[in-house]
Image (cartoon, rainbow, N blue to C red):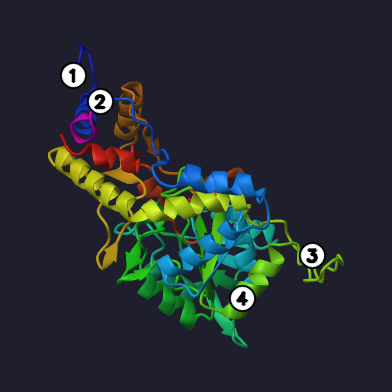
Amino acid sequence: MNSVLPSASVTAEQLTALEVVNAIARAIGEAPAVLHEPQFAGNEWEYLKECLDSTFVSSVGKFVDRFEKDLADYTGARYSVAVVNGTAALHIALKLAGVQAGDEVLTPALTFVATANAVSYCNAIPHFVDCEEATLGMSAVALREYLQSVAELHHGVCINRQSGRPIRAIVPMHTFGHPVDLDGLMAVAHDFKLVMVEDAAESLGSFYHGRHTGTFGRMGTLSFNGNKTITTGGGGAIITDDESLARHGKHLTTTAKLPHRWAYEHDQIGYNYRMPNLNAALGCAQLEQLPGMLSAKRQLFDAYRKACADLPGMHIVREPAYSQSNFWLQTLKLERENMALRDAILEATNAAGYMTRPIWRPMHKLQPYVGCPRMELTVTSSLEQRLINLPSSSGLGARGAR
Ligand SMILES: *Cc1c(COP(=O)(O)O)cnc(C)c1O
């Protein structure tokens, strides 16, 4: 294997960045490696062929029912509703949670934009919460203190005293698959009468105290986008233990059509958000392989952890206490804020053929969301400068540490 050798007149940051490149090479072998690629090593072809042979490729078919059942079985949720993507799942879950126009919804500032967008689709306003260093997710401690100072309960509704608007719901997200502090956040939700919807888009296969993420809130939402742990091409799901929410969710995502042998009767404005049978067929095949992918991802984490152990001033992010992460994306965390070093690492790794990425730009810095209410985002602003995602495909784990 080739080591990258420094040439003359390089900065200290560039030198360190080359050490990172070499550490990645020790962990996963030679470049190239993309950030996350899907793996189709199971019954995908067989199930897809079954769809085509049966002509059931679209809204009806046995794979949709089976996928919903398999998801419920795997996560331990009583019900699941398969939909077109994770964003649609969040949109509908928030509607079902009672989020109305003019409400505020607490979301992490550090998340993929879909979390905030789903709130906007309800004509509600995202209200950004800081995260904690250990989990990279919403900080229950900071949030409680903040709500104590800006919010009050009025006839059982949490009101933002500064804006006068109801704060209706809270949407924690399990960043890169690492479970957030659910006990702390559930207590805050309870005390401030907030409905909790978990954005578990990144955390299929992640457990908190032995229970699957997404099953702690009133509802949880999953994503099966092409870059997620398992994929259906595009897809998502709502999971819940509440039968009437599940039934209402299915109804809303299938144009709110009343069952009838021929009549087109729709009792409200529904959405065409159902997952096609073709995508569900992929999902069934992918879910069968999830346990193997998860152990490969854990192996990959071990390989990175060992390879990066001696790098100065940085380390690989571990799973939080009391949790089992799916390690969707592996993350290198700089111990101190150092934009020059972060960018030098991004530059050197991408130049070497290892696809790496910074964490998302925090929501309050995105043009559509600059004016939204938010608390002090100290940890978010720090983490923005310190996190780098590394190549994380489950296939890399199977290659083993070298
Ligand atoms: C992937 C993702 C979603 C949903 O994504 P879709 O591409 O719509 O399936 C939502 N929230 C987070 C945090 C995500 O990472």
Quadrant, the N terminus: top left
Q: Which secondary structure lies at badge 3?
A: loop
Which of the 4 image quadrants contains residue 119?
A: bottom right
Q: Decide which of tag 1 and tag 2 comes sooner along the chain.
A: 1
Residue lying furthest bottom in this view?
155
Residue lying furthest left in this view?
310
Q: Decide which of tag 1 and tag 3 comes sooner along the chain.
A: 1
- Amino acid identity at mark 3: Ile
Residue 155 x %, y %? 62, 88
Asked if residue 164 shows in the view, the reply is no
- Amino acid identity at mark 4: Leu
Marks 1/2: CA–CA distance: 8 Å
Marks 3/2: CA–CA distance: 53 Å
What stretch of residues is rendered in magenta? 25-30
Q: Are marks 3 and 2 in contact (CB under 8 Å)?
A: no
Q: Are marks 4 and 1 in contact (CB under 8 Å)?
A: no
Q: Decide which of tag 3 and tag 4 comes sooner along the chain.
A: 4
Q: Are marks 3 and 4 in contact (CB under 8 Å)?
A: no
Q: Are marks 1 and 2 in contact (CB under 8 Å)?
A: yes
Q: Which residue is mark 2?
A: 30
Q: Which residue is mark 4?
A: 245
Q: Which residue is mark 3?
A: 269
Q: Which residue is mark 1?
A: 2
